[in-house]
Image: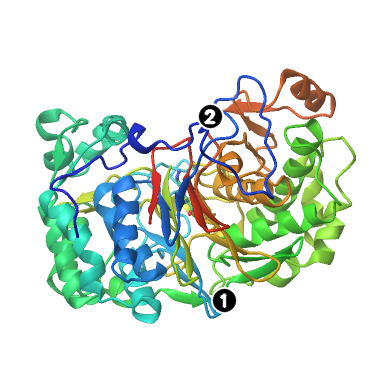
Amino acid sequence: MDAQTPARGATDAGAARALQTSIDYVAPPDRRPAHFPPGWRFAAGGAPFVARHAIVASDAPIASRVGSQIMRRGGNAVDAAVATAFALAVVYPEAGNIGGGGFMVIHLADGRNAAIDFRETAPLAATRDMYVGPDGKVTDRSLIGPLASGVPGSVAGLTAVLARYGTLPLSTVMQPAIRLAERGFVIDSASGRTLRGYAHNIAEFGGAPLFVPDGQPLRAGETLKQPALAKTLRAIARRGRKAFYEGPIAEAWTSELAKRGGIITMEDLRRYRPVWRTPIRSTYRGNTLLTMPPASSGGVTMTETLNILEGFDSLPPFGSAGWAHIVGSAFQRAFVDRNAKLGDPAFVKVPIEELTDKQYAARLRATIAPMRATPTTSLKALGEGTQTTHVSVADARGNAVAMTTTLNELFGSSVYLTSAGFFLNDEMDDFTSRPGVPNMYGLVQGEANAIAPGKRMLSAMSPTIVLDPRGKLLLVAGARGGPRIITSTTQVILNVLDYRMSLADAMSAPRLHHQALPDSLRIEDRGITPAVTDSLRAMGYHPFFGGAIGLVNALMRVPGGFEGVSDPRGSGSAAGF
Ligand code: DON
């Protein structure tokens, strides 16, 4: 691998910031010009990264380049996705991981589709009320510190997927990550800022010597070398999943965790298995969508939303009050079901067929009043009947991979295991700690997602592949952002399919979010005009304006190649050739 030593810029923000207006870029002829409200932070008509043969879009430019180079050396999209994931674990430690979990959807050139769930599981010693304090209040132990982590799934998932669908040896696809851990890379300004924000927590839970030396968080321009992580990665490259789940490395990190009060045991690791699942396959206006089934809620919620929207011959003009109302109401209804009915299918019966049925969506659509908000509480009866990272990859042979992986919050639980060189997730917060009490994302969830030993916590991760009406690859997308993963990914798809925007515009366009509870329509700051805001208020909405909704990484097949865009709200970039 021709990575420089040390490679510059984990997330090298400004360097490759693609979405500038470019007089050279001409959008494919089937795209329409987009119009955003005056004052919106991104200009329409921006240029994407364009590649002729193969492409990767991720949150870290170095990691995208690693994936691209693996394909240049003959690897396929799966090889590249796995290489990118391991590289993210090194250069993007706030979200890339070996101490977390994720989901991957795969579409192969020969028409086969697959999905793998490498979500974390609750440790065997976990109990339903472990985060409820003596006063009956939910504590923050599901978010920070040694009790917050589920049993990591990433190493098991990535090695399994490579064995089944990859073409290169594990040692080859892991080599760039090992090198980056060993030789180091230069922290850029985006990572520097993130580290500063989390320095206190990281220092409290073991990460001080590496990330906060002498009490000062590493800054942009400094080099981060991770010898312990390099050693762990080297062992995995040699011996596969066993190196992480059995033997001396596993013994070392589980006993280090136990000393600090954690409960993940060798038995938990021995039992951990990723699960191959059948992707949810649905259609939207003649296109085919392949998305992730539970233990992620992403695919069901996205499919339900799109089925509701498909019943409208066309969607209201982008950015109008009608747009916010119809799209927001569809999300609101899908999230009511998500929050109440979804959970790990090994533990609860999940009505996937009903929730993804077009007739069922028609019943939900009928509850959307023309130009009038519906309070979420009145929808409840209808029941009968902070850090993640997404990678989109496509190769020259027609294979595509959508993968989302996470530690949950930035740096997960903040617990850094010095013996093995990685951060552990705080995914336990995605369970319902107590029915009716909101989690970190304000999600109010039910019994279906209650904690039980060995159970997977419900996720919102939505890795998605869209095939065009002829069955050819069109789009690969996914995001980070908790429940906003679902709404942001869906909106990029709507922007491409309904509004015919170029990929760059589809990614730059203002976004909204509705997750049923809290019962509010959230819109990105300056994402709609004051007149539209007034109209929404008159319709009974209480629009709430806030920061970025989701960070999406997407690619689109266009005549002559691919376009790739990393969300302009973040600091990633695409790479390819
Ligand atoms: O699985 C989930 O839905 C969450 N743990 C995702 C967290 C996330 O996206 C944080 N990033 N901003």
Q: Depth check: give the residue in front, 6 or 439.
A: 6
Q: Quadrant of residue 371?
A: top right
Side of 372 relative to 250 (left or right):
right
Q: Report the residue marked by disc 1.
A: 278
Amino acid type of the residue tagged 1 in the rendering: Thr
Could you say which disc has been placed on residue 42 in the image? none
Callout 2: CB less than 8 Å from ligand 1: no
Query: How far apart in space, not on screen, are marks 1 and 2 (Cα)?
Result: 35 Å
Image point (53%, 80%), residue name: 110
- Relative to 25, say whether 576 is above or below: below
Q: Depth check: give the residue in front, 541 or 433.
A: 541
Q: How many labels does the image show?
A: 2
Q: Where is residue 510 in the image (x, y as percent from the top left)?
A: 62, 34
Q: Position of residue 61 (x, y in %)?
A: 33, 46
Side of 576 relative to 290 (left or right):
left
Secondary structure of the residue carrying tag 1 is: loop
Amino acid type of the residue tagged 2 in the rendering: Gly
Q: Position of residue 71 (x, y in %)?
A: 34, 65
Image point (74%, 23%), residue name: 533
Q: Report the residue marked by disc 2.
A: 547
Instruction: Tell me the quarter of the image containing the N terminus.
Output: bottom left
Label 1 packing within 10 angstroms: few (<14), some (14-19), many (20+): some
Image point (29%, 34%), residue name: 198
